[in-house]
Amino acid sequence: MSRLPWVYAGIAAYRETWPPFFDALAEGEAAFDIAELNVTTGDRVAFATALLRCGSTEELAEDNNTPRLRLTIGLRKVDGTWKIAHEHHSFPADGG
């Protein structure tokens, strides 16, 4: 079975996806704009869901309808410190 180009297996492959974005962010060419954020917490676990606008700073300035990025992060407390246990982000299939 062939893997889709946006499917990454393992933390090393996932880490390799971020440097181009961080480079663009440092150069002022990329941005996240949080449109909605919801956080639910407990004593040992928590999760956050968000809708973000993601794109170049120019795209975000020109277009309030830039596709939303959906983000879910699951956390758990380990030895008194919150650790990310799960992360998922995706763009809607219809681009909006």
Image (cartoon, rainbow, N blue to C red):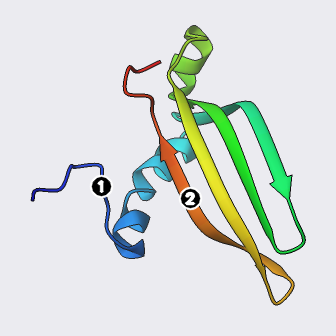
What type is the residue that disc 1 sits on? Val
The residue that disc 2 covers is 87
- Vertical relation: 36 (above or below) 50: above
Left or right relative to 10: residue 62: right
- Which residue is found at the position 36% from the left and 73% from the top? 10
Residue nearest the observer in this picture, 45 or 15: 45
Residue 52 lies in quadrant: top right
Q: In this figure, what is the number of numbered marks?
A: 2
Query: Which comes before the other along the chain, label 2 or label 1?
Result: 1
- The numbered dot on residue 16 is none
- The numbered dot on residue 7 is 1
Observer able to see residue 22: yes
- Which residue is found at the position 53% from the left and 35% from the top? 30
CA gap, disc 2 and disc 1: 14 Å
Observer able to see residue 28: no
- Which residue is found at the position 50% from the left and 28% from the top? 56
